[in-house]
Image: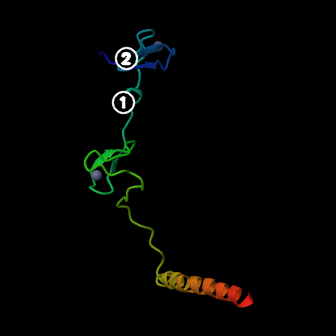
Amino acid sequence: MSEPERIRFCLECGEAMPYDDASCPACGASQPDSVAAPARELRPCRLCSEEYDAARLFCPRCGAERRAPPVLPLPAHVPPAGSEGRLPMLAAVLTLLGPLVLLAAVLAAYART
Ligand SMILES: [Zn+2]
Ligand SMILES: [Zn+2]
């Protein structure tokens, strides 16, 4: 069983040519390497940190599915000093008030019937 021949098209004349050839057999124009070998982006696995092709859905090492974007060790956006502490407080208040408002609405509905 032979593998099907892969072809690509000349950037100069558009002629079909063997995928792995560096130059076009029809016009002789050299083909950029980027066409023959597109740069592959490696992304670390979110579980085992193994770096593998970003196009792959499963880690070849641990088999974890790549759903969430990998966490990159980039410096996180740091809020300016001063606003720190207030936002978590606001979030906590909203988290506490949310169920209370819901409860009040439910009680009000019950009281009416
Ligand atoms: Zn050509
Ligand atoms: Zn993995």
Q: Please tell me which residue lies in front, 61 or 40.
A: 61
Q: Is residue 108 left or right of residue 50?
A: right
Q: Alpha carbon of mark 2 to alpha carbon of mark 1: how far?
A: 16 Å
Q: Say which amino acid is labelled 2.
A: Glu
Dividing the picture into quadrants, the one containing residue 27 is top left
Quadrant the N terminus occupies: top left
Quadrant the C terminus occupies: bottom right
Question: Could you say where residue 83 lies in the image, as x and y percent from the top left?
Answer: 51, 82
Q: Please tell me which residue lies in front, 100 or 66.
A: 100
Q: Residue at x 36, y 19 (%)?
A: 22
| Circles 2, 1 touching at the beta carbon (< 8 Å) | no
Question: Badge 1 is on which residue?
Answer: 37
The residue furthest top is: 26
Question: Badge 2 is on which residue?
Answer: 5
- Label 1 element class: loop
Nearest to viewer (mark 2 / mark 1): 2
Question: Could you say where residue 54 lies in the image, as x and y percent from the top left?
Answer: 38, 45
Residue 48 vertical position relative to residue 11 in the rendered view, above or below: below
Crowd around label 2: few <14 · some 14–19 · many ≥20 (10 Å) = few
Question: Could you say where residue 107 lies in the image, as x and y percent from the top left?
Answer: 65, 88
Q: Residue at x 30, y 57 (%)?
A: 47
Q: Is tag 2's residue or tag 1's residue first in the polypeptide sequence?
A: 2
